[in-house]
Image (spheres, grey):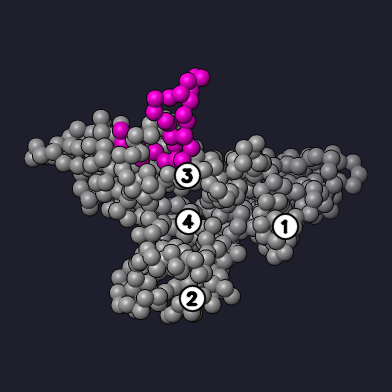
Amino acid sequence: MARITPRSQNQAKWYQEVVLQAELADYGPVRGTIVYRPYGYAIWELIQAGLNKRIKSAGVENAYFPLFIPYSFLEKEKQHVQGFAPELALVTHGGGKKLEEPLVVRPTSETIMYHSFAKWIQSYNDLPLMINQWNNVVRWEKRTLPFIRGLEFLWQEGHTAHATKAEADKEVMRAVDMYHDFVRDQLALYSVVGYKTETEKFSGADYTTTFEILLKDGKALQSGTSHMLGQNFSRSFKIQFLDKDGKLRYVWQTSWGMSTRIIGALILAHGDDKGLRLPPKIAPIQVVIVPIIKGDPTAVVEKCRKIKDQLAGWGIRVKLDVSDKTPGYKFNYWEVKGVPLRIEVGERELKAREVVVYRRDKGERLKLAVSEKAINGLLDDVQASLLKEHRDFSRRNIRQASSFEEMKKIIKEDKGFVKVFYKDNPEAETKIKEETGATARCIPLEYKDQTGVCFYSRQKGGRVTLFAKAY
């Protein structure tokens, strides 16, 4: 296995090497596509399983809608089609013939789903309608990076319809809070929840909420969003219901989603020069056992198998590596893959009735007797340690600026989030991006009622906003 380029030397090369050597993905034959290898897909399956429980507990049901969307559907909501037009992939021929109408390869499912919503919703008894689907989407990105931004990616997208605006507003916040809690509890990632500015909001939404994650290179990553669609789509698609008074009304709608981009966040937030560092709750393999064999392997391997059976019986995802590679090769291989704990068993460990346990997060070795309490306690500690490390890093890298000059200096020298008072103005935002490369990431919920003098326009009424360079 080739040595990974140090992150501090060349992060772009480091990232690509980690993706390949950790066997998360391989490059597809079409530019901007990737093959999800079993180890990478196993992480996504664990994310699916954990998030699916939360989605279903809110009364949302899973369904599946077509991949191909009539182009005329997108044209029904003008803001929506304008926002997605540069990224659309169109099918113009099928079965050897030119199609009467081009078909859009799904970039998102609002339009195809709301065509059905209009048929399914007739009265207030049909509300709320809450549907989620796990699928793939295609967006013709110019610049791509595995997991972070690609031509095709996997995600879930929730779509709900409600009788009142208040119910829809509540659903928007429920969804973004669900994401925030999930990535903190399962992926050990600290995120900031807030509103998007007018420039950054979803095309066709009244407003967008987001959770933003700060990565080790000081760039931010929009890792999931929840949108208040208002009645924009319900009017375009004539999604109406008879209320209790017999009056015909338009529904209020939301949509929300999180994608395989979150795997990119895992790599970039927790990874180090050796490769991945996976939080135990999301690691496909939580413990790997490596026999250290110098003579007859029988006793050592038998001991390793007993430990493996014990751990599996305790519900731990465990792997025994009995390949004929050297211990050094195995250590490096499993460190690149980010396995949280490694148990080393040799003849000394047999005699001492203890094993050596290596913690991937801290690079520490310790000796202990194998017990359910000891191993689960270590896994819990690794999970908590990674979260604390990322939370502390993120908070340390939120810096305040009161002027544009201050903001530019921070972006250039320190990176991270810049906290400013900002009066939302799309033209100003464009100029700020052109001059600094930074964009408005969010208006944090915790500061939503605070106002001050805008750092850019010097006008009153600026709201607390975080700017950063972003992926």
Q: Position of residue 7 (x, y in %)?
A: 69, 61
User: As rendered, which of 104 and 7 lies closer to the eye?
Assistant: 104
| Sequence-first tag of 3 and 2 | 3
Q: Calculate the distance from the C-alpha at mark 4 to the C-alpha at mark 3.
A: 18 Å
Residue drawn at point x = 80 percent, y = 39 percent: 323
Q: Is residue 244 above or below residue 200?
A: above
User: How many numbered badges does the structure rendering display?
Assistant: 4
Residue drawn at point x = 31 percent, y = 36 percent: 114
Q: Calculate the distance from the C-alpha at mark 1 to the C-alpha at mark 3.
A: 36 Å
| Sequence-first tag of 2 and 1 | 1
Residue drawn at point x = 49 percent, y = 66 percent: 434
Residue at the spot of label 4: 222
Q: Quadrant of the C terminus?
A: bottom right
Residue at the spot of label 3: 87
Magenta-tinted stretch: 87-115
| Sequence-first tag of 4 and 3 | 3
Q: Secondary structure at mark 1?
A: loop
